[in-house]
Image (cartoon, grey):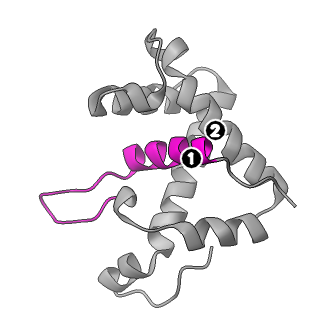
């Protein structure tokens, strides 16, 4: 059984995901940070292959501390402004380092899975289904 997320890792993960899928005030679309994703993360913990879980945890750690080497800033991702967070995610996704690009892609993929599996989002889109991963 994989290790459960530590509270600090949960905060880092949620901060990163909120930057990937922020709310859109113009359309009224909720951001991922507006959703209760506890059920998604619990189910993911139970059913996702260990390699996916390890990769996601690695993505959270690397991207949380990547401002040091991508932006030259001595702070974590959570200490950046929204504009700096966006810049960092764009740089990570376009990095010349394959592993960093893959970690950024995995984070974006998991953000989309979590967001579009949420019941309220599926209802707004008229898509049947629940909140299982």
Relative to residue 1, is residue 87 depicted above or below?
above
State whether residue 102 appears in this view. no
Task: Give the x, y percent position of residue 40.
Answer: 58, 70
* Magenta extent: 7-31
Residue at disc 1, secondary structure: helix
Asked which secondary structure carries label 2, the reply is helix
Query: Which quadrant is the C terminus positioned in?
Result: bottom right
Specify which label sits upstream in the sequence, 2 or 1.
Answer: 2
Mark yes or no: residue 31 visible.
yes
Count how many numbered circles sit on residues in the image.
Answer: 2
Is disc 2 surrounded by few (<14), some (14 to 19) or many (20+) residues within 10 Å?
many
Image quadrant in which the N terminus is located? bottom right
**Relative image position of residue 3 (x, y in whole percent):** 80, 52
Q: Which mark is residue 29?
A: none
Mark 2 and mark 1 residues within 8 Å of each other at the beta carbon: yes
What whole-number distance in Å separates the C-alpha atoms at marks 2 and 1?
Answer: 6 Å
Q: Quadrant of residue 39?
A: bottom right
Q: Residue 65 vs residue 71: left or right?
A: right
Task: Looking at the picture, tell me which residue is in the foreground, 45 or 96.
Answer: 45
The residue at the point 62 percent across, 65 percent down is: 41
**Which residue is the site of mark 2?**
59
Quickly name the residue at label 1: 107
Q: Is residue 28 magenta?
A: yes
Q: Residue at x 21, y 56 (%)?
A: 24
In this rendering, is residue 70 above or below 101? above
Circle 1 residues within 10 Å: few <14, some 14–19, many ≥20: many
In terms of depth relative to the viewer, which is nearer, 8 or 114?
8
Percent coordinates x, y for residue 52 in the rendering: 75, 53
- The residue sitting at 55% across, 68% down in the picture is 38
């Amino acid at each position: 059984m994989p290790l459960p997320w530590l509270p600090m890792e949960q905060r880092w993960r949620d901060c990163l995901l909120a930057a990937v899928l922020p709310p859109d005030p113009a359309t009224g679309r909720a951001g991922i940070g507006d959703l209760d994703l506890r059920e998604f993360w619990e189910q993911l913990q139970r059913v996702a292959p260990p390699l996916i879980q390890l990769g996601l945890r690695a993505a959270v750690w690397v991207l949380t501390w990547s401002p040091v080497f991508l932006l030259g800033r001595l702070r974590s991702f959570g200490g950046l402004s929204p504009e700096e967070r966006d810049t960092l995610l764009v740089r990570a996704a376009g990095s010349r380092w394959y592993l960093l690009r893959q970690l950024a892609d995995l984070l974006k993929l998991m953000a989309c899975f979590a967001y579009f599996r949420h019941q309220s989002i599926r209802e707004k889109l008229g898509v049947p289904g629940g909140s299982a991963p």
